[in-house]
Image (cartoon, rainbow, N blue to C red):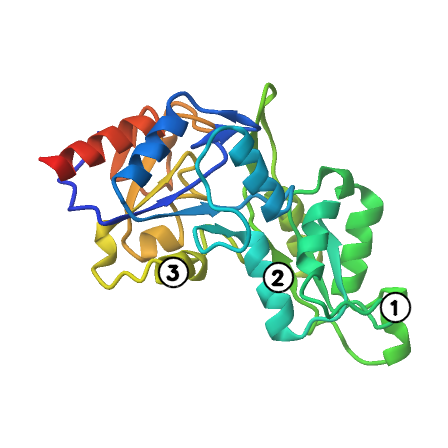
Amino acid sequence: MAARARPIIRALLIDISGTLMIGSTPIPRAVEALAELRRSRFPFRFCSNTSKESTSILQKRMLDAGFDVQIGESEELWTSLKVARSLIETRGLRRPYFLLSESSKDECMSAGRHDPNVPYDAVIVGLAPAHFDYDHLNTAFRILIGEHDSQKPDHKDLTTSIPLIALHKARFIESSGHGLMLGPGPFVAALENATGKEAEVLGKPSKAFFQTAIESLDYEGPYECIAVIGDDIQTDLGGGATDLRLWRILVRTGKYRPGDESRDGVHPPDEVWDSFADIVDSLLSSHDA
């Protein structure tokens, strides 16, 4: 329900995990609600921090769950992995150290510049539970401070030049059948604490991520008329979503827990609804009125 009068919403930025589906299971009525949005020609973009799997695997998982989604290289789906791949290419990174799953790593490396014979030149972190052990984190730490074996032949100070790049910093995620589980955020924070570096965050809630998705909509109106929908008050609806003055809608699914919208230090959402389907019903009924 809206805490203040809702503007006329012209487009949507839609979270996936916890908002449309949990694991591979769609949230009740989410498939039908998305289909109704498409039938109504309501502009939208998917905005996902999913980093445990590649974008193509995410697309297939959505299709298998019954969602009507575009496949291949589509401007409809924006992920932090796609941003990482673009960043690797534009910055000319030749050998990042990846704390990523194999499929996510392969997507990032598809930029085509990887060279295993040069020193590591970045650390890129996503959700990679199998890599969050002492050996992997210590290797990342040593690269970031310029003391990894691959860097020593250069004999130059690398401590300020090696970036720590986080696909996102979510503290926890909702796992199908297991409830809340640790996200990559605590492990990124550990590397920040140990190295004194601040991670560059590529996905939500970075302002640049939201702006890139909005630009793909070819939308020229006020940002207040774009709604962002998600289950995480901080990662989905905080940061850039607040700075850009997007209309922020929290759903009580996924990682949502009672009281999230009123916790200390949290900027309250503009609306709170029980599910994605409920907010779509409300949006479409107001457009038809």
> Which quadrant of the structure image shows residue 258?
top left
Residue 142 x %, y %: 81, 60
Residue that carries the numbered disc 2 in the rendered image: 85
Residue 27 can be seen in this image: yes
- What whole-number distance in Å separates the C-alpha atoms at marks 1 and 2? 23 Å
Residue 116: x and y, percent?
85, 66
Pair 2/3: label in front? 3
The answer to which image quadrant residue 145 occupies is bottom right
User: Which part of the image, by quadrant, shows the N terminus?
Assistant: top left
Towards the viewer: 12 or 209: 12
For badge 3, the amino acid type reads Ser
Q: Reading the chain from its start, which is encountered first: label 1 or label 2?
A: 2
Instruction: Give the foreground label among 1 and 3.
Output: 3
Would you say the residues marked 1 and 2 are in contact, meaning their CB atoms lie under 8 Å apart? no
Q: Earlier in the sequence, mark 1 or mark 3?
A: 1
Residue bearing the label numbered 3: 216
Crowd around label 3: few <14 · some 14–19 · many ≥20 (10 Å): few
Local secondary structure at mark 3 = loop
Quarter of the image that includes the C terminus:
top left
Q: Report if the CB atoms under discs 1 and 3 are less than 8 Å apart.
A: no
Distance from label 2 to label 3 (Cα)?
Answer: 17 Å
Side of 135 where 4 appears, left or right: left
Q: Nearer the viewer, residue 142 or 69?
A: 69
| 21 sits to left or right of 278 | right
List the residue tagged with mark 1: 150
